[in-house]
Image (cartoon, rainbow, N blue to C red):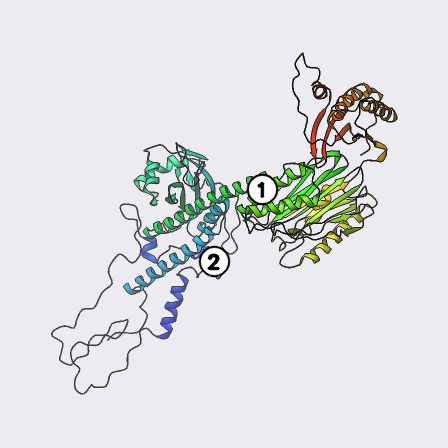
Amino acid sequence: MTEHPTSHDRRQAAASATASGAAMPEDAHGAVPDPRTGLGQGPGPAATSEPDPDHRPRPAGHEAEPHRPGPPAASAAPGAPAPVSRQAEVPAERPAPADAQRPAPPVAAQPPAVGTPGAEASALAARGGERLRYVGAATRRIARGIDLDEIVLGLCRATVPTFADAILVYLRDPLPVGDERPVDPVTLRLRRTDRIPEEADTETRLPLLPSGPDLSPALGGGPAADLCEVRAGGPLAEVLRGVRPVFGDSVAARAALPELLGEGRTVATGNRAILAPLRGRRRVTGAAVFIRRPERPPFERDDLLVAAQLATHTALGVDKAVLYGREVYIADELQRTMLPDSLPQPTGVRLASRYLPAAESARVGGDWYDAIPLPGNRVALVVGDVMGHSMTSAAIMGQLRTTAQTLAGLDLPPQEVLHHLDEQAQRLGTDRMATCMYAVYDPVAHRIVIANAGHPPPLLLHRGGRAEVLRVPPGAPIGVGGVDFEAVELDAPAGATLMLYTDGLVESRIRDVWTGINQLRERLTETARLTGPNPPPLEALCDEVLDMLGPGDRDDDVALLAARFEGIAPSDVAYWFLDPKAQTAGQARRLARRALTRWDLEELTDPVELLVSEVVTNAVRYAERPITLRLLRTDVLRCEVGDDVPQLPRLRQARPSDEGGRGLYLVNRMARRWGATRLSTGKVVWFELAMPPKAPAHPG
């Protein structure tokens, strides 16, 4: 008669299985199972038996096949009941007696008794389930990484202490990108190590160790080498070429580990190891060494499959991280070349700027800013925003910015610049949309002319601390076509600050545009109140403005351009209209001499008279309308001569027999800088002279 365990015995058996069983399943957040469950530990024989002759432990449950009951013996009495197995009742094959027509109630399946072949098979199946759950959780943790450090850290945290007590991760240096041909010879660099602390408290959370903890207890002969040059045809190259992980006590690993870890170094006596190559999509990218202490059960054959999965997912993650790094580099370089390296610092205005990408995964965008010096110490201020956050948006932004610079060099009015930008956007494509704000500041007149193409309105922070939203006609976005743009001229008092920005600063999923604009105005007012009567520093003001962005406010990239108006005092400007006649050159010399005397710059009288005479003579020769002469005293002395002839003068070498052609040669030799700019009404030729050492500099 077969004895079945009682319910009390079954509870005790279940408790014993739970006490020696596997790790709990992974939680809903994808965490790796509890490291103290002892993954890979089997019941008695598998954990304590001696290793096989080839030093590879044999998984528990493979020692003997479970007994399978055969058919009933031939000598059994007719009508005798068929034997019943421990798992379930098996119906007899011969016909039942006539008086037993009703089927007997089935016997409930009973769990196998502890220590029987069925129990060993159940334990083996449980450990297999543990490995599957662990591999799933570990690979998800590795796959969460984006860059190399995150992926390698994910491997270490998923491995130690659940699968191994220590780990060393080597990666190729340099790592090949995509189809790039790798550099020969192959060099592996120790990227990260990790281990369990020697004095770990099993009742508390394991402490975090640095990225390169001391692995001396796990290695023999000293710490591992940082660099390893793989010898062609050597034992390490053969293991890497074989792709599959190998036990540390195998012949191949015993020869390869000293080459990887360094001369004279290997796994410490008593420790068990697995050497796993990291192979990506096309080539081996590194290697990982998993180490277990002597007091822990040794690695089993199934652990080679686990190591292979960890190595494969890590290698694929490394490939992904390298490609991602290359894309980030390309995006950063593209965005950097599309935006100005530095802003000019023209006389009469101070400039500061900021740019923030939308997110780490979207480093390129269509926002841009620019500051373009114009004739007469004026400056054009431009801020624009192309729809989208792609390479295409950045390319379109670059084309529009180049077009705006070209149009600004023609000294066109702001509304005309926007009109030509609209035409250019339509030529680029029917769906190329952008917004733009274009402003021209004149430090002499203390005025600013602004035209808008669907962009958020600018803000003006006055010297006293009051911030206001400027009333600028909104206009239609660039690329719509068939619309007119309107410009407005406003006062630009000295000490005031103009803030031009893109919608990413004021608009997000949690606030609309006008709510953000009001918050920006309040932030400017609060910042100005901290500095009292003096305006806040321009760079610090930009930082304060960006601080208003919260964690959930970065839905779009942000471009910010701040301009502090300082202007040029009327006492530092001398301006005349002169008729184009033969006596004009002498009249210009006399006017320039008087201005220099008034400014206490008599030391510059001779060079200024000579250069003014040459430039004015050239203008009078071809002009039909009155010419203009202007002198500006700033940190340099600047002279500007304007006429109605659009052709720009060119510097050429005069021959000895030529009567003229030496005027610009003298200007080029004597002036600090000089140039010519075409205007909508003609051109301006200008030159600058350095101030004498004792001359009072402009206060701005």
Residue 12 shows in the view: yes
Q: Residues within 10 Å of mark 2 (few under 14, many from 20)?
A: some
Decide if residue 563 is on the left or right side of residue 198. right
Query: Where does residue 420 sit, x and y in percent of width and height?
Result: 63, 44
The x and y percentages for residue 363 are 56, 46
Q: Which residue is mark 1?
A: 399
Amino acid of disc 1: Gln
In the picture, the disc for residue 30 is: 2
Mark 1 and mark 2: span between their CA atoms? 46 Å
On residue 109, the disc is none
Q: Residue furthest bottom?
A: 99
Whether residue 105 is situated above or below residue 623 in the rendered picture: below
Point out the residue furthest to the left here: 75
Type of the residue with mark 2: Gly
User: At 41% across and 58% down in the image, what residue appears?
Assistant: 133
Q: SS for tag 2?
A: loop
Look at 27% across and 45% down and name the residue there: 54
State the residue in front, 58 or 405.
405
Question: Which of the image's four quarters has the C terminus?
Answer: top right
Front residue of 522/646: it is 646
Q: Quadrant of residue 40?
A: bottom left
- Quadrant containing the N terminus in the rendered view: bottom left
Q: Nearer the viewer, mark 1 or mark 2?
A: 1
Residue 411 vs residue 68, the one in the foreground: 411
322 or 130: which is nearer to us?
A: 322
SS at badge 1: helix
Chain-order first, disc 1 or disc 2: 2
Q: Using residue 699 as the reference point, say whether residue 403 is left or right of it.
A: left
Q: Residues within 10 Å of mark 1 (few under 14, many from 20)?
A: some
